[in-house]
């Protein structure tokens, strides 16, 4: 399983596990970590025996560890639609800019997934408003944008192996 799939795939990913635990009445951080390790991906680092709430993901640049303490609580941290409306009508320019036409608002999340225009009514489910749902939508948009590009790579030139200024090793530069 690719690392990106481990994180955001619709079924059997870290995001789907977190969303599932948030929907359960007795969902817990321990349930999240348990289900993450049941995914059985080769992109996961071995379980940390010293801290049972840690899980690691193998990235190209190295292993990155995450602590699931308060994952459920943090994921449910949503902005009430009434508060969002109040801020969007604020006289404070910054507040108004942040909360006006927020395509990641709870109201717009379910519509964006279906490809429709923003929903006219304010009520949505917890699943549509969680931070994970918002982040997953942003990640999907990023992946789509990356897939539409033709990346060009710039080669970094290392002038020497000792990483010191003013020293140029022609063999090192040509490598």
Image (cartoon, rainbow, N blue to C red):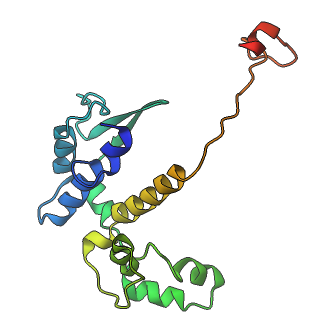
Residue 69 visible: no
Residue placed most toward the observer, 128 or 140 = 140
Q: Residue at x 33, y 45 (%)?
A: 5
Q: Is residue 76 above or below residue 81?
A: above
Query: In the rendering, at what x and y percent does residue 91 appear?
Result: 62, 91
Compared with 39, 80 (above or below) is: below
Residue 118's spot in the image, x, y percent?
Answer: 41, 83
Q: Residue at x 28, y 81 (%)?
A: 124
x, y percent for residue 132: 34, 60
Residue 154 visible in image: yes
The answer to whether 44 appears left or right of 91 in the picture is left
In the figure, is residue 18 to the left or right of 56?
A: left
Q: Nearer the viewer, residue 154 or 62?
A: 154
Q: Quadrant of the N terminus?
A: top left
Q: Nearer the viewer, residue 99 or 5?
A: 5
- Residue 161 picture quarter: top right
For the residue pair 27 and 106, the one nearer the viewer reads as 106
Residue 123 at what x, y percent from top left? 29, 86
The vertical placement of 46 against 114, above or below, is above
Q: In the displayed structure, does residue 27 sit left or right of residue 61?
A: left
**102 relative to 9 in the view: left or right:** right
**Quadrant of the image occupied by residue 117:** bottom left
Residue at 11% over, 61% down: 26
Please determine whether, in this image, residue 113 is positioned above or below residue 92. above
For image coordinates 23% across by 28% down, the residue present is 49
In which quadrant of the rendered image does the C terminus lie? top right
Count of numbered marks: 0
């Amino acid at each position: 399983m690719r690392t990106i799939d481990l994180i955001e795939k619709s079924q059997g990913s870290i995001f789907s596990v977190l969303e599932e635990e948030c929907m359960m009445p007795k969902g817990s951080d321990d349930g999240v970590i348990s289900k993450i390790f049941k995914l059985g991906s080769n992109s996961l680092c071995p379980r940390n025996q010293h801290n049972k709430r840690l899980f690691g993901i193998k990235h190209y640049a190295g292993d990155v560890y995450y602590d699931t303490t308060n994952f459920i609580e943090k994921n449910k941290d949503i902005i009430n639609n009434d508060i969002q409306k109040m801020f969007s009508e604020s006289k404070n320019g910054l507040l108004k800019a942040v909360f006006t036409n927020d395509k990641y608002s709870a109201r717009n999340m379910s519509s964006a997934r279906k490809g429709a225009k923003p929903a006219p009514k304010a009520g949505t489910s917890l699943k549509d408003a969680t931070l994970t749902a918002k982040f997953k939508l942003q990640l999907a948009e990023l992946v789509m944008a990356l897939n539409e590009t033709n990346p060009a790579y710039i080669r970094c030139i290392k002038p020497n192996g000792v990483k010191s200024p003013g020293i140029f090793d022609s063999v090192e530069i040509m490598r």
